[in-house]
Amino acid sequence: MTVKENWIEIGPLQDIPRLGARVVRTPQGDIAVFRAADDAVFALDDRCPHKGGPLSQGIVYDRRVACPLHNWVISLESGEATGADRGCTRRHEVKIENGRILLRLAAAHGAGPAAEPRCASAR
Amino acid sequence: MNREKLVLVGNGMAGVRTLEELLKLAPDKYDVTVFGAEPHPNYNRILLSPVLAGEKTVDQIILNDEAWYDGHGITLHKGRMVTRIDRRQRRVRTADGLEAAYDRLILATGSHPFMLPVPGRDLPGVVTFRDIHDVDRMLAAAARGGRAVVIGGGLLGLEAASGLSKRGMDVTVVHLLETLMERQLDAAAAALLKQSLEARGIKFLTGRETQAILGDDHVRGVRFKPALSKVEGDGGEVAADLVVMAVGIKPNIDLAKSAGLYCERGVIVNDTMQTYDPRIYAVGECVQHRGRSYGLVAPLFEQARVCANHLAELGFARYGGSVTSTKLKVTGIDLFSAGDFQGGAGTEEIVLKDATRGVYKKLVLKDNRIVGGVLYGDTVDGSWYFQLMKDGTDVAHLRDHLLFGQAHLGDSGHGEKVSQVAAMPDHAEICGCNGVCKGAIVRAIIDRKLFTLDEVRAHTKASSSCGSCTGLVEELLASTVGADYTQTPKTRPLCPCTHYTHEEVRRAILDNELKTIPAVRAFMEWKTPDGCHICRPALNYYLICAWPGEYADDAQSRFINERAHANIQKDGTYSVVPRIWGGITSPQQLRAIADVAEKYRVPTVKITGGQRIDLLGVKKEDLPKVWGDLAEAGFVSGHAYGKALRTVKTCVGSEWCRFGTQDSTTMGIRLEKMTWGAWTPHKVKMAVSGCPRNCAEATIKDFGVVAVDSGWELHVGGNGGVKVRATDLLCKVETMEEVEEYCAAFLQLYREDARYLERTAPWIERVGLEFVRKSIVDDEENRRRLAARFRDSQQHAQKDPWAERAAGVQRQEFAPLKTVPAVRAVA
Ligand code: SRM
Ligand SMILES: Cc1cc2nc3c(=O)[nH]c(=O)nc-3n(C[C@H](O)[C@H](O)[C@H](O)COP(=O)(O)OP(=O)(O)OC[C@H]3O[C@@H](n4cnc5c(N)ncnc54)[C@H](O)[C@@H]3O)c2cc1C
Ligand code: SF4
Ligand code: FES
């Protein structure tokens, strides 16, 4: 496994279906990696802020995913629930290099080496 | 970028709603300027009645505060009346000389209250009931006490009377006819209404025509014409310190007329809400469309939506006129009226009158369709009747219990049936699924200024799951905000991504040979790039149904259960339910299931309510292996996760049972073999009972078969679950082959006609049993064709998804992309 500045290579882009997601198992728990229609990728904890539903199993559209359990719609960019719902799930950094997806885990808690993307409105 | 200039004249309900709709479609297209003659931002005029009655304050009825205008970059000129439109220069000008240029103009000037042309009408103390200013004047008068005379016993007049009476005035209502609210009520309902208003201390003088308003420097009384004042009283005069003139409204066309726009009673517009000047649109009460003007907000909001569509240059919405209904907003009085409630030639009436309960219900039917009705005392079913009326549903099969309402004894989820939501305590649970009580819904409606069912769903979650409380929530909306514009319009779009209805989308798919989801979205100008979790599964289904064998299923547009072919559980594991044909199993099958359960450590093995066995708690990555083992033992997927055929429940039938008349088990297995794998708008359940004792509960199934000595009774449209509905008897047939043919035809009709996520029960209630009968029983040719289309589509559908996946199809769905072991960070 290649680990460079904490970027972990997790596989080729085409292994995630467009408008779909795959799970990455990590010591911090499952992480859902999403691929939008335009091949942008996003990573969130695979836990819905509502009741922990696996977001990786939801329907993806635009920059959002609808949770499979009770249809909360979560923003892939911010991890926040959209519409009238309130809640936020943790984001992780992802990028694509040479068709491979690289993931950098947000620190479990506290300040870590990687910049920790926060929710704009932690409620 | 140079934006076009849009000017709105009339800062009222219709005009501002048009802007709101426009902002949703094209937020950046225009620089918007609004002129409003009133010195307030846009408020909810409907709620003036509760303000008058002291149940609400003016602040509570503001719909768009100044921050809203600012936030959208809209320039608002309050308290400024536009007096001139220069159509050549494309400029408007106010009374005090302010000018603004426009590229497009919206006229939404509302109505003038109608003033009777009688002497004394200009005296101080004579008021109308139209705006905040009028309410202020009435409140000032009420503060001094004394007598009020309300001229006009229509909706507005009665709401004014009730408000003033609550404020302590001695109120008399004068009405020209004997029947109050004659445009909404028949004589019987009007009499009940009058009684209950009288009980609140309001006096009535009916059959009186006003001749003059008396007084020198202030109103002091009202005099009636002699001819009509024959009934009672002292020569036809009553004393008054306040006179409220509420005899009707007339469209305010002053400005339009002065600008030379073609007007009749109202400003004439076409189906795109355009006036004779193509740059000028008109919406609201000032408009006359196909010969009609409207005085209720529901139709005005429909106009607003169409107008916005054209202003945004989308150009496809059309306004075709509206069907309206009315509710009286006097607290404690329940009254609902819609359509042609008087009846007449060619119509029939069904009436329920219960004087002790103070309930009166009348429905007017024409050709077995509801064309109008009046409800007094119990209006819970108003929205249901109104929907049946707008949908033109054939209600022949409902006639027996139509007046008892939509509520069925068997409904689950919200305790005892409550007939008057208004009377319920705040802690009463309305939505059993999401645990939302009445108080929370009412608070959300008020605090967040919610108008529609969808908004309430988004903010409170009430009615967003099983939907059985939708009627109650609509009632709460109605009783909290007034009016009935909360109702789901007939032309409800498929989802917020589109303006089109399910029906329009399906028609376009067939007519234009659209064969992929992106093609549908492009052709129908979807508003969102990828659709959403509501429209994508629906489109996927419509395409499968339209192009069997040809359409390539889109896995990413399926809900997880159908994508993974197992049912997701609350902890993210899955359940596996193999098909057990007709509920008949064998030791070999049971052993195979037991082996699988042990091998994969399935935590729970349960007998389902559908005569099969559920393996609960299977990990996603184990699914293909579990299926592989089950497939080896001969099992196929039970589709317990799908909008598809679920189970065919059977009883033991004539093979064993001492009462059995036919072989119900074999019949059930044959039906299940024929129909498994079919994708349907919602799940489909079937059952076959061997005699009318009906141990298989066939009469609450989507398609139920009950054996009798001479053959098979076919029942359709049953539903257990949230809203229990017993089936309707479709017909009787003799042979098993006929049962199969009718079943195939029925399912195909349902597949082609119902909306996605509509089960057979609500579908039949919407389209009417007659439609199903005509298509399947009366028309043999059509039945054959439907059955043939079903069988054709089954050739492509009956592939076991489990076997395919056990063999490696979509392997990636079931495996993690990667497992990252614990690593130490490298600096
Ligand atoms: C397993 C079972 C309960 C049991 O332990 O017995 C069950 C379990 C679920 N039912 Fe059911 N229903 C089961 C029989 C029923 C029955 C009884 C029957 O079919 O005879 C009914 C009432 C009859 C009817 O549908 O008309 C029933 C009415 C519902 C409803 C309400 C449907 C309605 O139209 O009102 C839902 C919600 C929905 O489908 O939207 C539902 C939904 C569900 C779901 C699928 C909820 C979900 O989406 O996760 C549950 C899935 C659990 C799972 O993973 O297995 N289930 N459900 C039964 C499976 C039968 C089978 O072998 O397939
Ligand atoms: C007391 C009351 C109770 C009601 N109850 C119900 C109900 O229960 N259900 C229901 O559906 N409907 C009800 N209505 C009717 C509903 O309020 C109207 O149908 C709706 O407000 C009409 O909207 P509109 O935009 O056409 O007109 P309005 O809301 O009247 O807006 C028109 C605005 O244009 C302004 N204006 C006019 N000319 C000019 C000009 N030249 N320059 C600048 N501004 C101008 C006016 O001052 C006014 O503010 C009720 C009405 C009243 C008065
Ligand atoms: S199995 Fe059916 S009744 Fe039981 S909790 Fe789930 S949906 Fe409700
Ligand atoms: S757990 Fe995601 S919506 Fe409930």
Image (spheres, coloured by chain):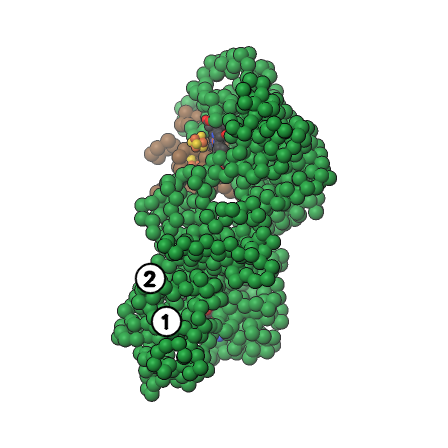
Q: Residue at x 58, y 75 (%)?
A: B264
Q: CA distance from mark 1 to mark 2?
A: 26 Å
Give the vertical position of B771 relative to B308 (above or below): above
- Pinpoint the chain carrying mark 1: B
- Pinpoint the chain carrying mark 2: B
Residue situated in front as seen by the camera: B11 or B294: B294
Residue situated in front as seen by the camera: B741 or A18: B741
Q: Amino acid at mark 1?
A: Phe
Give residue B109's position: percent from left, percent from top: 49, 71
Q: Amino acid at mark 2?
A: Lys
Give residue B390's position: percent from left, percent from top: 55, 54
Mark 2 = which residue? B56
Q: Residue at x 58, y 46 (%)?
A: B768
Query: Which quadrant holds residue B38?
Result: bottom left
Q: Residue at x 64, y 39 (%)?
A: B749
Residue most extreme to the right: B781
What colour denotes chain B? green
Give the vertical position of B203 relative to B673 (above or below): below
Query: Which quadrant holds residue B276?
Result: bottom right
Give residue B12's position: percent from left, percent from top: 46, 67
Task: Indicate which quadrant contains ligand 3.
Answer: top left
Q: Can residue B466 be seen?
A: no
Q: Residue at x 27, y 75 (%)?
A: B146
Whether the residue under disc 1 has CB within 8 Å of ligand 2:
no
Mark 1 = which residue? B204
What is the quadrant of the N terminus of chain B in the image?
Answer: bottom right
Do marks 1 and 2 share a chain?
yes
- Local SS, label 1: strand
Give the vertical position of A111 relative to B187 (above or below): above
Query: Which quadrant holds residue B703?
Result: top right
Instruction: Note the chain letter of the brown one.
Output: A
